[in-house]
Image: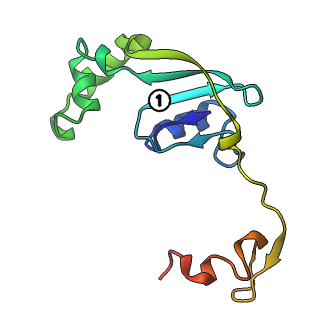
């Protein structure tokens, strides 16, 4: 699976399919688009589904929520949920696609060594020390 946003959509994919970030079957491409592609991972044949903004005109609560036209506290949650249920897939567009899986392939971990700086295991391809010991750690 490919999600074209890191917001919300990958959670649904991981919940409803066997595709996860951990097993490498889910790729997140941060294009900022609310779109999802499900494809056969070896041949690349698949379907891309996206929220079609042109189809939102008859669904004002969905349109307002999606485009963040009102602050959350001013939104009518029940009306929004009702419109989502009523709209169903009518607000989506499907496209047949062919995915090139090569650029999405995750490299193998490769050889592992013990970092002389921290004593933890790390991929040898990262150099003589782990990335954290080279100053890339987020910890203060």
Work out whether 113 lies above or below 81.
below
User: In front here: 13 or 134?
Assistant: 134
Where, by quadrant of the figure, is residue 47 drawn?
A: top right
Q: Residue furthest bottom?
A: 117
Disc 1, SS: strand
Where, by quadrant of the figure, is residue 89 drawn?
A: top left
Number of numbered discs overlaid on the protein picture: 1
Which residue is pictured at 70% across the width and 72% down the height? 126
Which residue is pictured at 50% across the width and 78% down the height? 139
In the image, taking residue 67 as reference, residue 12 lies left or right, namely right
User: In front here: 11 or 74?
Assistant: 11
**Which quadrant, please, contains the N terminus?**
top right
Residue 52's spot in the image, x, y percent? 37, 20
Are there few (<14), some (14-19), or many (20+) residues within 10 Å of tag 1? some
How are the residues colored?
Answer: rainbow
On the image, numbered disc 1 is attached to which residue?
35
Residue 3's spot in the image, x, y percent? 53, 36
User: In front here: 11 or 48?
Assistant: 48
User: In front here: 115 or 76?
Assistant: 115
Work out whether 112 lies above or below 78.
below
Work out whether 119 lies above or below 19.
below
Work out whether 9 lies above or below 131.
above
Residue 9's spot in the image, x, y percent? 48, 36
Residue 110's spot in the image, x, y percent? 82, 62
Q: Residue furthest right?
A: 111
Which residue is pictured at 35% across the width and 11% down the height? 86
Which residue is pictured at 55% across the width and 76% down the height? 136
């Amino acid at each position: 699976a490919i999600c074209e946003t890191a917001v919300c959509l990958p959670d649904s994919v991981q919940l409803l399919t066997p595709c996860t970030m951990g097993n490498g079957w889910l790729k997140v491409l941060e294009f900022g688009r609310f779109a999802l592609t499900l494809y056969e991972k070896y041949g690349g044949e698949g379907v891309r589904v996206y929220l079609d903004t042109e189809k939102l005109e008859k669904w004002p609560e969905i349109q307002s929520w999606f485009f963040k036209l009102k602050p959350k506290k001013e939104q009518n949650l029940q009306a929004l949920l009702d419109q989502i249920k009523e709209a169903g897939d009518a607000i989506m567009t499907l496209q047949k696609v062919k995915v090139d899986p090569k650029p999405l392939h995750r490299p193998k971990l490769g050889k592992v060594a013990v970092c002389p700086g921290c004593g933890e295991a790390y991929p040898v391809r990262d150099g003589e020390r782990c990335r954290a010991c080279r100053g890339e750690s987020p910890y203060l």
